[in-house]
Image (tube, grey):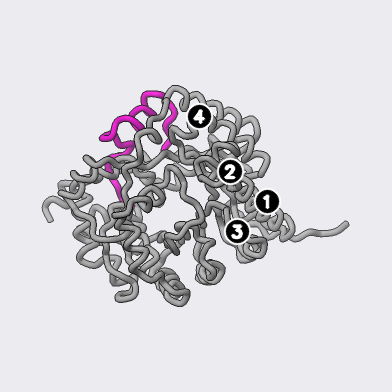
């Protein structure tokens, strides 16, 4: 009898054995327990934060696709695009610069690094970047469209123990290719998924955990239940997220309160035909997907968890409605753009540049502190109402203790 050593990540082994209802409960408990880290600073530190838990590194804005619902792709079609000028005028961080930032993040106490783009695997040094993250013993998530991954890269991400890869899947083949505006993208995506799954089997590993993530919009709302069967066939999880958008009115109100100064300045006013979702159809599709996932044993995640037609209507058709009205994200996470600018989120406030200052100095500098103080005062900014980070009702239930920080 041959003994086979299984090099399994225990977290994802446990996740794979849980039914969906238990997984939602565990996620809720984990969210509650971890909230102390940022809530305590929110209340008692007057704009300063405890060491960050997470950083999202946008290694490039270059992409092999021009997706129909992507704010970046839409913005870059505009001859007056600020983002296009930013990409043309600035040099991306070099390999050694990104690795230095990763080392700084490890010393600062960051637990999780998310690598994204653009398309991360366009960078020729992407494997060096991922290796540096794992050498610092940090959890590493990668977001990709799967269109350019090579076989040797699939082998290496499994070998080095990348924790999770999220691939974008927006519909069955004809819809996915239409949204991604590439007739081969569905095939390329599945090829990437299968290369990784094959390597996991060959190396007796259960990571990267693979999730197929869908951006729900009017382009695919009528076919999303079909994605569960695709996920089941590929032995992956499925995630439903909602289209993020702003409007000119939301932008103008926000800019009067706190104007953008950097980060990733793109036009996020998605065309109406993309966000005009038939909420009754989508509600039925989500329920069908949930039932199918239960039957097929697939892990399904809906962020935020809204399924009823009236709630979906507010999400897509009521611009001022927000699922959550208090944001804690800048108290535990930051973003880094390809040119070294640190910024908090889609608010696009430049906090400084890692070519000029280390992360530790930027995290609680005067600009960051002022931004957090203002955010604490307003709850969320008008343009943030549809932000994907606002997915946890716990944030509205945590005591604000305004009486405490109002007296400061």
Up the image or down, 105 lies above or below 299; here it is: below
What residue is shown with label 4?
286
Q: 256 or 105, which is in the foreground?
A: 256
Give the mark, 4 or 2, whose residue is nearer the N terminus. 2
x, y (%) of residue 111?
A: 45, 62
Name the mark nearer the viewer: 3 or 4: 3
Q: Are marks 3 and 2 in contact (CB under 8 Å)?
A: no
Q: Are marks 3 and 4 in contact (CB under 8 Å)?
A: no
Give the mark, 1 or 4, whose residue is nearer the N terminus. 1
What residue is shown with label 3?
149
Left or right of 373 on screen, residue 330: right
For disc 3, the neighbor class at 10 Å (few under 14, some 14 to 19, many from 20) is: many
x, y (%) of residue 355?
A: 34, 75
Q: Specify the quadrant that holds the N terminus.
A: bottom right
For disc 1, the neighbor class at 10 Å (few under 14, some 14 to 19, many from 20) is: some
The boundaries of the magenta stretch are: 304-331
The single residue placed furthest to the right in the displayed view is 1
Mark 2 residue element: strand
Q: Is 313 in the magenta?
A: yes
What residue is shown with label 2?
237
């Amino acid at each position: 009898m041959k003994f086979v050593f299984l090099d399994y990540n225990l977290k994802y082994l446990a996740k794979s054995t849980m039914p969906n209802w238990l997984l939602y409960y565990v996620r809720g408990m984990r969210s509650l327990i971890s909230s102390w880290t940022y809530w305590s600073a929110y209340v008692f530190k007057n704009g300063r934060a405890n060491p960050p838990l997470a950083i999202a590194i946008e290694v490039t804005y270059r992409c092999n696709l021009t997706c129909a619902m992507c704010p970046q792709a839409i913005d870059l079609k505009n001859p007056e695009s600020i983002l296009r000028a930013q990409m043309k005028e600035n040099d991306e961080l070099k390999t050694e610069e990104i690795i230095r930032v990763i080392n700084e993040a490890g010393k600062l106490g960051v637990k999780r690094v998310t690598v994204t783009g653009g398309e991360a695997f366009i960078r020729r040094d992407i494997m060096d970047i991922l290796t540096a993250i794992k050498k610092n013993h940090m959890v590493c998530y990668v977001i990709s469209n799967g269109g350019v991954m090579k076989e040797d890269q699939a082998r290496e991400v499994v070998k080095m123990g990348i924790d999770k890869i999220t691939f974008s899947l927006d519909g069955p083949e004809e819809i996915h290719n239409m949204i991604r505006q590439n007739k081969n993208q569905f095939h390329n995506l599945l090829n990437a998924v299968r290369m990784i799954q094959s390597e996991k089997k060959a190396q007796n590993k259960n990571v990267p955990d693979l999730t197929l993530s869908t951006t729900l919009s009017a382009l695919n709302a009528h076919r999303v239940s079909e994605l569960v069967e695709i996920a089941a066939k590929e032995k992956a999880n499925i995630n439903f997220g909602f289209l993020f958008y702003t409007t000119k009115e939301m932008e103008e109100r926000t800019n009067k309160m706190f104007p953008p100064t950097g980060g990733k300045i793109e036009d996020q006013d998605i065309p109406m035909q993309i966000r005009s979702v038939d909420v009754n159809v989508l509600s039925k599709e989500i329920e069908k997907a949930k039932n199918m996932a239960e039957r097929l044993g697939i892990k399904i995640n809906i962020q935020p968890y809204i399924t009823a037609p009236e709630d979906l209507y507010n999400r897509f058709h009521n611009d001022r409605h927000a699922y959550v009205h208090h944001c804690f994200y800048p108290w535990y996470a930051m973003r880094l753009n390809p040119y070294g600018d640190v910024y908090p989120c889609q608010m696009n406030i430049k906090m400084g540049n890692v070519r000029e200052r280390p992360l530790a100095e930027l995290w609680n500098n005067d600009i960051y502190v002022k931004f957090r103080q203002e955010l604490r005062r307003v709850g969320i900014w008008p343009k943030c109402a549809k932000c994907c980070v606002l997915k946890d009702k716990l944030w509205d239930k945590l005591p604000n203790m305004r009486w405490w920080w109002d007296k400061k």
